Amino acid sequence: MYRLCSLKIITYFCELNLNQQSCTIRRKTASDHSIILHMEHTRIKELLGSDEFGKEVIVKGWVRTFRNNQFIAINDGSSINNIQAVVDFENTEEALLKRVTTGAAIRVKGTLIESQGKGQRVEVKVNDLTILGDSDPEKFPLQPKKHSLEFLREIAHLRFRTGTFNAIFKVRNALSFAVHNFFREREFVYMHTPIITGSDAEGAGEMFRVTTLDLDNIPRTEEGKIDFKEDFFGKSTNLTVSGQLEGELAAMALGNIYTFGPTFRAENSNTTRHLAEFWMIEPEMAFYELEDNMDLAEDLLKYVIKYALDTCPEEIEFLKNRLLEEEKSKPQNERSEFDLVQKLNFVLENSFERVTYTDAIEILKRSKPNQKKQFKYLIEEWGADLQSEHERYLVEKHFKKPVILTDYPREIKSFYMKQNAPDAEGRHTVRAMDILFPGIGEMVGGSQREENLEKLLTRMAEVGIPEEEMDWFLDTRRFGSAPHSGFGVGFERLVLFTTGMTNIRDVIPFPRTPKNAEF
Amino acid sequence: MYRLCSLKIITYFCELNLNQQSCTIRRKTASDHSIILHMEHTRIKELLGSDEFGKEVIVKGWVRTFRNNQFIAINDGSSINNIQAVVDFENTEEALLKRVTTGAAIRVKGTLIESQGKGQRVEVKVNDLTILGDSDPEKFPLQPKKHSLEFLREIAHLRFRTGTFNAIFKVRNALSFAVHNFFREREFVYMHTPIITGSDAEGAGEMFRVTTLDLDNIPRTEEGKIDFKEDFFGKSTNLTVSGQLEGELAAMALGNIYTFGPTFRAENSNTTRHLAEFWMIEPEMAFYELEDNMDLAEDLLKYVIKYALDTCPEEIEFLKNRLLEEEKSKPQNERSEFDLVQKLNFVLENSFERVTYTDAIEILKRSKPNQKKQFKYLIEEWGADLQSEHERYLVEKHFKKPVILTDYPREIKSFYMKQNAPDAEGRHTVRAMDILFPGIGEMVGGSQREENLEKLLTRMAEVGIPEEEMDWFLDTRRFGSAPHSGFGVGFERLVLFTTGMTNIRDVIPFPRTPKNAEF
């Protein structure tokens, strides 16, 4: 199983486990944990960066291409790049060579050498070739040619084997880790808020029912109603649309917390921006006011994008080139001003523009597309809800950078947002903030929360949320209420922006959308 | 909002945002990201470690106790420890002092001084006291006395305000981060596998249905069956019981991946070890065989426990003492040999015992409780499924350390596990591994996977899993199959072990169990 360790290298130590008759080579890391350094094979990423020419190596991976009966491009997922293995075809059985097909899993033992050809620095001169698993070229759907993203979505279980999806999921992974690291540095507590919720009053959208009732034989009460007492949880339950309310409970005790987990919307939206199941990051902070909330959100977005740029340079370069290639098919005037790397750096280098809703409405009213009636929804008066076209105008045309819109009209926002004092014209606003990104629209939605029990109860009554259902939530305002704030980041939108992809179904492993829950 | 920065300290820079008329003090971190250093208030954790006596500080938090009309113990969640604020009661309005009740949120401005009293090093001499949010002492359920864990479970939304639950959720947070850091160091890709699944063939237990059908008016096909084409996803869907199968798809392209997300079992188990909704960590590795799998699992468990010990010493000390206190009510012979810290260190310092099922059965057969018929289920022959009592005997009595049991009988394990060649007696085993922990039982379940398509199909037919439903999964064996392995860690069981708690409902923020989905 394991290669024997070299006794010369004293930082390695060999742990001989007599029971198992196996020898694991481990290395003390800086953090004093032993990590497995070498299995029988070496990862391609390591080999591509190696200059130990002449060394005997073992590679395991999948065949991407096989040219001239001689050059095998092998990928093991560790890198978007393949390693080239060169076969001595004159001295290799023909039957074996025939099995070197795209998609086949192989094991290659050979010598690491400096490459003679173009396009790679190192290659492996093959001494021994083994087929681990065949791949029938008549049936394997991924051939060495460009496949459309639509086609790849249909074979989402195999698309991880393409360079594009390798890069996307590496970037997604980097962004995920960066989220956790950002909050760890600030000593936030990661809370796993519940996925199944008995509350249906969150008001953020349509919900999925969770049940174990037999749909062919639904139990009924004496009055003929569905008897949810018989359901698993003894009541009607749904999938959560947000961990915010539970997050508030934790923040009002632990100070600063965040969630990062799946959330659900049963909305029949078949767009490139919506999923029925998506991941959301929701920090909630006691004693934070709206300004602090905006600062934290801006810091978070910049931190995670910078982390992706720093740790995935090859993947982002690959995605940048993919995007440039894709844009070639567009007319000149529809192409982006910036490439992907420039776009990401632009976000890092500029402060987000902070604008009140009221100021934004004035800008939109006076805007050319409004004057020329080019907007589908014309902005006529204060109070209008902003549509995607308006958000895009503000971000992409007017300010040309991310924008934080604040202090929205109370009537178009959620009941739990802190109310401002009415303005000189008697208009009611709430301490909301939405962060809008170019090409994406709403990346973040947040607010300072209403900490005043009376105001909250009045607002709940106005919008029709029964007090008794939210009793536990209201306890935060009954016992030691205090200013607090929070926001939610749609994680897939963040991945969309950072990868330069345009369809949200391409940045989550197995997208769930109306009429689609494959794999 | 923000305190003005000291211009003397040149590593700080003041970012004056004229639009917002606010001044944020930021500091360049090592990673070159700016982080907010100071809001108006300072976190109690920082103050408790400070020796800047004479400095004016602002504290915001919740009152834990108020003694002698003079000493307020304040907690803001940043630490399990409170800071003491000393009020000049003779010069403070009585009406104000009356509002300093347990649970109230307050803001205190004062001078940091060396404490005169016992039990703390620093305290705050109060110059200004503000009540942010009252807490009616007649109604606030958490009084400064010992509450039972059962009572606290009923007010799960407030239990975060106790020292015990502060400590538990800090440790849970540390373990979560450690999981991500462990896999990042090894370049595993974090995959968000789907929560809603169209597959019901995973066979790991009872599932919850996810639906948007109107239960009062279920659509029917012409044959009178439920018409799932009308459901949101156009078919019958459930909550996932495991991300493994999707994880395998990703591993067979990206190499090494892991999941860390919620999973669900609709089992009517009302025990201290089971939840209907729990978090699971599931790594899956291409080209790993069973030995590698065991090494990785052992490394992971040791790494995360060590990380918790290193980063949460105060919390674990607190939990250790809580446990010692709890054990005082037990008879001497039922108390633990080790305290919590010793128990955790014991795991770190010893190799897990690796034993085959076949050897374990021999040990159990010859064991005293089997000979004396003290086991509820006597071990009579090879093939018996191991019960909790047997696992505990092996771990707690026989080996006295974590045990990895391998090579279980094929008939008692899942269809996807790699089959060994039959032994000399013709018995069939699979390359399974379960890691058993003292006091917990099964902490990890895993295996090398069956990579041979024919063997897998035969086994599926034997256990009645329809091939067509698993077509996407079988593609991994059709196109470039290769040895691979993986395992699952029940995250709450890991938190249970690390915190020394005994009921799994106490280590997840809002437990979901039969007839219980509160908050």
Image (cartoon, coloured by chain):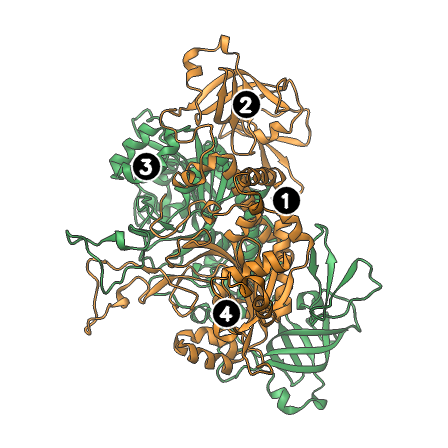
Chain colours: A orange, B green
Q: CA distance from mark 4 to mark 3?
A: 47 Å
What secondary structure is marked by label 4? helix
Q: A37 above or below B38?
A: above
Marks 2, 1: nearer the viewer: 1
User: Are discs 1 and 4 located on one and the same chain?
Assistant: no
Q: CA distance from mark 1 to mark 4?
A: 46 Å
Q: Which residue is mark 3?
A: B471
Marks 1, 4: nearer the viewer: 1
What secondary structure is marked by label 1? helix
What secondary structure is marked by label 3? helix
Give the class, few, some or many, for how many residues have Cα within 10 Å of label 2's Cα (few <14, many ≥20).
many
Host chain of mark 4? B
Whichever of callouts 2 and 1 sits on the residue coming sooner in the sequence is 2
Host chain of mark 1? A
- Residue at the image point whose x is 48% and y is 76% from the top: A475
Q: Amino acid at mark 2?
A: Ile
Q: Position of residue A130 (x, y in %)?
A: 46, 19
Q: CA distance from mark 2 to mark 3?
A: 32 Å
Marks 2, 3: nearer the viewer: 3
User: Are discs 3 and 1 located on one and the same chain?
Assistant: no
Q: Which residue is mark 1?
A: A341
Give the class, few, some or many, for how many residues have Cα within 10 Å of label 3's Cα (few <14, many ≥20).
few
User: Are discs 2 and 4 located on one and the same chain?
Assistant: no
- Residue at the image point whose x is 68% and y is 32% from the top: A11
Nearer to us in this view, B78 or B113: B78
Q: CA distance from mark 3 to mark 1?
A: 39 Å
Give the class, few, some or many, for how many residues have Cα within 10 Å of label 1's Cα (few <14, many ≥20).
some
Q: Position of residue B189 (x, y in %)?
A: 52, 42
